[in-house]
Structure formats: C-alpha cells, structure tokens
Image (cartoon, grey):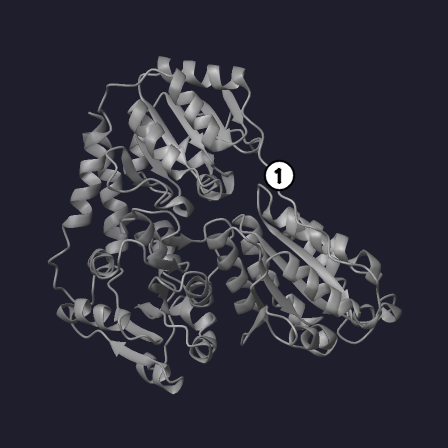
Amino acid sequence: MKAAQLFVKCLEQEGVKYIFGIPGEENLDMMDALLDSEIQFITTRHEQGAAFMADVYGRLTGKAGVCLATLGPGATNLVTGVADANMDHAPLVAIAGQAGTNRLHKESHQVLDLINLFDPITKFASRMPTPDILPEVVRKAFKLAQSEKTGACFIEFPENIAKMDTDSQPLSVGYTQLPEPRADQVAYAAELISQASDPIILAGHGVVRAGAWEQLAQFAKTLNVPVTNTFMAKGVIPFGHPMALGSAGLQAHDYANCGFDHADLIICIGYDLVEYHPYLWHPTRDRKIIHIDSGFAEVDESYPLECCVVGDINLSLDRIAEQATPHSGDLMRPLRKALIDEMNQHANDHSFPIKPQKLIWELRTAMAINDIAICDVGAHKMWMARMFRCEQPNTCIISNGFASMGIAVPGAIAAKLSNPEHAVVAVTGDAGFMMNSQEIETAMRLNTPIVILIWNDGGYGLIEWKQINQFGRKSHVNFSNPDFVKYAESFGAKGYRVEKAEQLSGILTTALADNTVSIIDCPIDYSENMKLTEKLGEMVSPIQA
C-alpha cells in the first residue's frame, strides 16, 4: 500500500474519529486515502481554527485531537493552536505536508524547516524520511501526546514519501499506568497536613487529566480543608461543595489570595506553574508546600517544596486522607460567604449596557449544569473565571497556559462534536470573536448547533483595564465592529441583539433551543472592571481581622 494509506490506517489504529484541517497540494495523497476511511475530515476555513478544534477536542476527551495542514503557510497557521495545546497540556497531534525530500536541502518554494519550527512548542517533532518508519513515528507521537503531562506532537510528511509503497503495518496501541506514590512521601504529607493550623488546597488541571475530581472532593471533605482551583480546573470541585472557594488567578488580592495569606500549608494538587504563577499567590516564599501530582514539579523560587508526592493522583489523595488528621477550623468560611454574596447581588440588575455579573448570572441560569462554556481570552475571561459557577469539570473551558485569543468559536465546534448531547456556548469578546469568526461557516456546514455569546465593548477590554490600572489612560485599544446580527444571517445562522437587560434571559433561552448556530450581540459595561479591582483590594483587611 501507499505510505499515505498506511498513515491513515495508523490513525485509525489510534482511535482517531476526526481530523481538522485544510487540503493542500503537498497532502493530496493523504486526502485521497481518507476517502476510504471512517475518519471524518473536518474542512475548516483557517488552519488556526483547525488547531484550536484539535486542542479543545483533546482537552475534553483525553484522546489526541488531530489537525492537518499543507506545507509553508498552512503549517505556520497551525502554530498558535499547537502552542496553546502544548502549554495547556491538551493532547494533540499536528500533521503537515512537506515538499519532497529531494528539495529540502535548498531554497525552495514554500519550504520551511518545520521540525525546528515546531520543536520548541511540542513534546515531539519528527519528519518521515522513509515510509517504513511511519508506524513507529505515529505511535510515538500519540503515546507522548496522551502521556502525562499531555501535550502536542508534530509529524512532517513529505509528499514524495506519501506516494511510496510500503509493507509496514500499524503498531498495536498499549497504555501504561501511573506508578503508585511512595509510602514515605504519603506519610510525610499526612503528617504535615495533621500538624498545620490553616491548610488550603490549590487544585490544578492535572486533577482533571487524572480523572481525580471525585477523590479531590472527598479528600477536602474528609480533612475539612478549603479548595481553590485554577482557571483551567474550574468545576474540579463542585461549587456547591462546602470547602469550595472558587477560582484563583485574577492577579488581584481576591478571596482566594486572602486564603493563601492566611494559610500555613498550601497543598498543590495537579497544579502546573503555567496555570497561575506562584509569585502571585506565594510572594513571601515562607509557607510550606506539598506537591501532589503525576510528575515532579517545575523549579521556581516561589514554589519551594516541603514534600513531593508523585504518582497516581487518585491513589495519593486516598492514602493521604487515610493517614491525616481532619481539621476542625472554619476560618475560610467568611471567604466563601463573601464570594457567594458577590455572585448573587446582580441577579436583578436591569442597567444597560449589561454588567458582567448580570450576564454571567443569566448565562448560568439558562445553561444546564452539564452544558459546556468555551471561554475566549479577554476581560470576559476574568469574570467567567470568578463568577461562572461550575459543578462539574470540563464544563467551563478556559485557556490559561498559552491563553490565546480566538479559541472560543472553533473550540465550541469541537466541544459539540465530542459532546453532542450537551449545549455548547462560545463565550467571547468582540475582538476574539472576529479572529476566527470564519468558522461559523464550518459549524453551519456540519450542522453543529452552538451559541456564540459576544461581549461587545468595541475594544480590547482587558488591555484597557491594565492600561488604566498602570498609567491612568488607555492607548490604541478601540475599534469598530460589523453588524453582528447581519453577519450571523449572512452565514445562514441566527442573530440576536440585546437592547435592554430584560431581554437577555429570553434571548439566551431561545438561542440554546435553536438547534443551529446562534450569535448573540450583547453590549457590556466594562466599567465594572475597575470596581472589581478596587473591591478586591478592600476585602483583605476585614476578612483577616
């Protein structure tokens, strides 16, 4: 068989259901081979959209999402989404066509050194110099992409290699189990927790990847230790859990940071430094830290470890909980009450443009508990991370490693493909929406119903927020937008514009029931950004008093 046909068979062996991408001259043989496969090729409108779809698909399923591009500009367009997946530890395999090996040694049309381009942003980047090694390369790429810590891998497939014949066959897929934690590490962690007066847990996305959220909730309940989660771990402990303190990472002195100030022991579970810099929550560097994860921690001067429990997170939590002495204090409860009060206070706010708190209240009310929100990057991300209540993991997806704008619309398409039984909402600013809005056509063509909720402020709101904080004035952050309702209708989608607060609830309910792509243009009052910053600063003294 042709090497291109073998490649497709290897992908089938890995359980690939979708490939997101754009055909090109240098992947013609691959595209032809896919016609005889059960793998569904999703033709996107931009390679960045394809990479983001593979990124979110991998994050939600735990199986590597796959994206495909041609050489040169097609491959470079994949870079942002691939980097996002790698830094967010989402399993992804990117494939790019390449010129024939007979012209890679010289200056040639559209030829770039793709291995050196992708090497810094992947766990593994490899060229296919001969068809006979293809099964090994594909198996290694998927194995590394799906092994802790999961991430992105890249395969370059020259067009002349794709045409060659080969007698090789796909390799069998094997899975490895994480090791058990060492008994002495478990015992020391239990001792530290028992001796602490005010411990706090910081839960990261590794808990989601390990499927350890039930163990985390039980661990916190058994030991009576409060839990704050990173943006990427929203829902890892139900917000209704009495120990839940909400999300940390606003880079302001908020509820969670008050908890860190108060704590003498910080228990980091499945936490990656890229999710929330340690110097922001541990500037004093004088607290004891326990690191519980599948792998060893990154080195950071603000993350000095007293104890490191490495191995299966589920087993680690169960065994530590068996040995540690439960706590009886409730010093963190005022923090939780303050957070709940803040979430509730704008439920009946009818001001317009709409406040972020009101928009999130209505969105949470309209969506079912297991529906999925894909959050873009911008000022709205900060509000969603703080105010959007989650009872389950993977129901509010936030990119906070690479944190790239433009992920919400393509990500929502991937979320709907992987979870067709749940409603999916892309929560995005007007800037992030326009970066990959062309993928609306992809969603319409696939008959993939999603809701796109645009927080419209006519500018780069998060950057303006930071400019005002630092300089007291803004610089070059404003722009104009198209008519989003007409824009939606031009794709055959439905468009809605919120013109007063009383309309919001009904529009959200209608859009979620539309069974098509629905776009909601909602003017937002981002003057609340500065009020949030001021309020968080005022909170510290009364809660610690």
Left or right? Give the position of 417 relative to 3: left
Q: Where in the figure is residue 252, as x and y percent of width and height?
A: 33, 42
Vertically, is 180 above or below 191? below
- Number of dots carrying numbers: 1
Q: Where in the figure is residue 176, as x and y percent of width and height?
A: 62, 39
Pointer 1: residues within 10 angstroms few (<14), some, or many (20+)? few
Whether residue 262 is visible here, answered yes or no, is: no
* Quadrant including the N terminus: bottom right
Under circle 1, the secondary element is: loop
Q: Residue at 26% of width from left, 50% of height from top?
A: 387
Amino acid carrying mark 1 in the image: Thr
Q: Where in the figure is residue 59, as x and y percent of width and height?
A: 49, 53
Left or right? Give the position of 331 relative to 318: left
Dividing the picture into quadrants, the one containing residue 432 is bottom left
Left or right? Give the position of 144 relative to 227: right
Q: Where in the figure is residue 216, as x and y percent of width and height?
A: 38, 33
Residue indicated by mark 1: 176
Whether residue 354 is visible here, answered yes or no, is: yes
Vertically, is 381 above or below 164? above
Dividing the picture into quadrants, the one containing residue 117 is bottom right
Q: Residue at 81% of width from left, 59% of height from top?
A: 168
* Quadrant including the C terminus: top left
Q: Residue at 57% of width from left, 52% of height from top?
A: 91
Vertically, is 21 above or below 472? below
